[in-house]
Amino acid sequence: MEHYNLSAATFSDEINVQRSSISHLLSGRNKPSLEFVLKIVDHYEEVTLDWLLYGRNSFPTSQKNNAKDQEEKIISSPTQNRKDTALLIDKSQKKTTPSEIERIVVFYQNGTFKEYS
């Protein structure tokens, strides 16, 4: 909101959420839902999930970061042996490295979430 010089009301209108949702998030009463986060990412091209959720990379994104994001994809296969692993594929180097899942977060429609470590 600060980067775009938006008020809470204007921001809520732009991403199509209730103004009270923004107020509750800013006050710390509620945590953002997955739907809320996705609305931000969908509306603002410069905002990436990686930056918004983990603070990785930079904001606003540059062309260089966008190209790198498109090169790296995290995939998982339902046919794997039910291990808690994901594969990181770096298309520029054609390497595949397994990495363990650190945590899973389930977001519910009522705005709550449950975290599994």
Image (cartoon, helix red, strand yellow):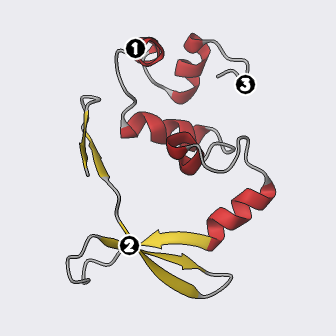
Instruction: Decide: few, some or many residues near mark 1? Use Cα within 10 Å; few <14, some 14-19, many ≥20.
Output: few
Q: Tell me where residue 50 appears, x and y as whole percent.
A: 55, 50
Q: Secondary structure at mark 2?
A: strand
Identified by mark 1, the residue type is His
Could you say which is closer to the camera, residue 18 or residue 105?
105
The residue at 40%/30% (across/down) is 32
Verify CB contact (< 8 Å) between mark 3 and mark 1. Answer: no
Instruction: Decide: few, some or many residues near mark 2? Use Cα within 10 Å; few <14, some 14-19, many ≥20.
Output: some
Q: Secondary structure at mark 1?
A: helix
User: Mark 3 or mark 2: which comes first in sequence?
Assistant: 3
User: Mark 3 or mark 1: which comes first in sequence?
Assistant: 3
Give the foreground label among 1 and 2: 2
Q: Tell me where residue 28 appears, x and y as whole percent.
A: 40, 16
- Residue bearing mark 3: 4
Instruction: Decide: few, some or many residues near mark 3? Use Cα within 10 Å; few <14, some 14-19, many ≥20.
Output: few
Q: Secondary structure at mark 3?
A: loop
- Residue bearing mark 1: 24
Could you say which is closer to the camera, residue 99 or residue 51?
99
Label disc, if present, on residue 91 of the rendered structure:
none
User: Mark 1 or mark 2: which comes first in sequence?
Assistant: 1
The residue at 39%/38% (across/down) is 35
Verify CB contact (< 8 Å) between mark 1 and mark 2. Answer: no
Quadrant (top left/top right/bottom left/bottom right) for the N terminus: top right
For the residues labelled 1 and 2, the Cα–Cα distance comes to 34 Å
The residue at 53%/78% (across/down) is 89
Q: Is residue 87 left or right of residue 1?
A: left
Identified by mark 2, the residue type is Ala
- Residue bearing mark 2: 86
